[in-house]
Image (tube, rainbow, N blue to C red):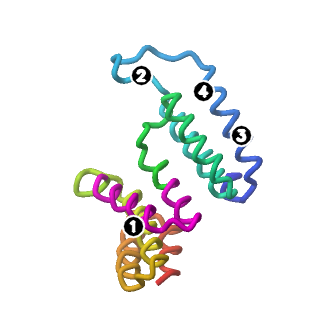
């Protein structure tokens, strides 16, 4: 709730408390050595904290937190949500070409036809469209953003649909 009302400091404090509690909680034995037992809420809380840092404009903190979360096993090293945030940070820093390359790579890996999350796919399309726009390719950007808007609407992500639609 604090994240949605732009109380970033409060959101950060609450999420850090949650993550500290998760870190201190006794762990259940892993199902196998290859799959360590990490509470599913750890990944969600870690991503919310990364999003909080991003929304507050604390980009270095966002990237560092994602690295620490991966080291602790809360996120995969190549978590697509964390990589999406990294792509937006690249774009915010004026690095449209690497942001587009990252989005394109993740779009291939997360395609809904391959079982990927349609909301994540739409958000990646939004990033790619913005990168295309920043690279001076408005027609391509419009096409990608139009597709992102349709996917977002279909998946019920009206916030990203509105952002993408506003850029058309």
The residue nearer to you, when weighing 125 against 27, is 125
Residue depth check, mark 3 versus mark 1: number of the one nearer the observer: 1
Q: Is residue 105 magenta?
A: yes
Secondary structure found at label 2: loop
Residue 24 at x, y percent in the picture: 63, 20
The residue nearer to you, when weighing 12 against 153, is 12
Lower position in the chain sequence, tag 2 or tag 3:
3
- Please report the bounds of the magenta region as a residue range: 85-109
Q: Which residue is mark 1?
A: 125
Q: Which of the labelled discs sits on residue 14, or is there none?
A: 3
Q: How many residues crowd around disc 2 within 10 Å: few (fewer than 14), some, or many (20 or more)? A: some
Lower position in the chain sequence, tag 1 or tag 4:
4
Q: How many residues crowd around disc 3 within 10 Å: few (fewer than 14), some, or many (20 or more)? A: some
Q: Which residue is mark 4?
A: 22
Say how many tags the image has: 4
Lower position in the chain sequence, tag 2 or tag 4:
4
Residue 126 at x, y percent in the picture: 44, 69
Residue depth check, mark 2 versus mark 4: number of the one nearer the observer: 2
Q: Which residue is mark 2?
A: 36
Lower position in the chain sequence, tag 3 or tag 1:
3
Q: Is residue 121 magenta?
A: no
From this viewpoint, which residue is outermost toward the left? 113
């Amino acid at each position: 709730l604090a994240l949605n009302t732009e109380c970033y400091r409060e959101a950060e404090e609450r999420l850090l408390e949650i993550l500290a509690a998760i870190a201190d909680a006794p762990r259940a034995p892993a199902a196998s050595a290859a799959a360590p037992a990490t509470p599913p809420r750890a990944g969600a809380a870690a991503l919310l904290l990364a999003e909080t840092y991003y929304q507050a404009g604390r980009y270095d903190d966002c990237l560092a937190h994602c690295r620490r979360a991966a080291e602790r096993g809360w996120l995969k090293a190549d978590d697509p949500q964390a990589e999406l945030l990294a792509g937006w940070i690249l774009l915010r820093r004026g690095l449209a070409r690497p942001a587009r390359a990252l989005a394109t790579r993740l779009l291939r890996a997360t395609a809904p036809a391959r079982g990927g999350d349609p909301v994540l796919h739409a958000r990646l399309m939004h990033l790619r469209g913005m990168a295309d726009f920043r690279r001076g390719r408005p027609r391509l950007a419009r096409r990608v953003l139009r597709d992102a808007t349709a996917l977002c609407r279909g998946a019920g992500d009206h916030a990203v649909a509105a952002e993408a639609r506003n850029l058309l």
